[in-house]
Image: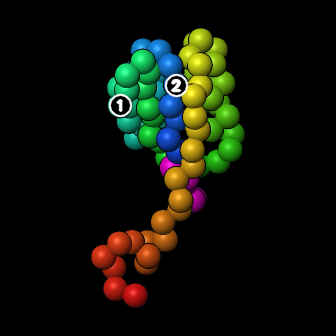
Amino acid sequence: MSRSVYEIRAVGDAPSELLDDFEGATVSIDPGGFTIHVALGDDAELHGLLAALSRQGFALVDVRREPDVDPGDEEGAPP
């Protein structure tokens, strides 16, 4: 199954226990908030994470889908 990587920025303290259901999610602390990097399988997972953040009172600043990387197109790979 294809997975897409997302970068989600929000205001507040990082929700460590909230991310337990999202395998491989990493959180970095930013001034005034945090950034989550996570690979998700479909839109339902993305909307589930965004809804969970909203229920916890976090204000979303930005949600970005990172470009998909074809394994044959990785940097340094021969053409």
The coloring applied to the image is rainbow
Q: Is residue 61 left or right of residue 70?
A: right
Q: Nearer the viewer, residue 79 or 44?
A: 79
In primary-sequence order, the first of circles 1 and 2 is 2
Q: Residue at x 53, y 44 (%)?
A: 6
Q: Residue lying farthest left?
A: 76
SS at mark 2 in the image: strand
Q: Is residue 53 left or right of residue 39?
A: right
| Amino acid, disc 1 | Ser
SS at mark 1 in the image: strand
Q: Position of residue 20 (x, y in %)?
A: 44, 26
Q: Which residue is mark 1?
A: 28
Q: Nearer the viewer, residue 70 or 23?
A: 70
Q: Position of residue 46 (x, y in %)?
A: 62, 38
Q: Position of residue 16 (x, y in %)?
A: 40, 21
Q: Which residue is mark 2?
A: 10
Viewer can see residue 20: no
Q: Is residue 71 left or right of residue 29?
A: right
Residues shaded magenta: 1-5
The vertical placement of 19 against 1, above or below, is above
The vertical placement of 63 against 15, above or below, is below
Residue 33, located in which quarter of the rendered image? top left
Per the picture, the main secondary structure of the magenta-coloured stretch is loop
Q: How many marks?
A: 2
Gap in angstroms between the C-alphas marked 1 and 2:
11 Å
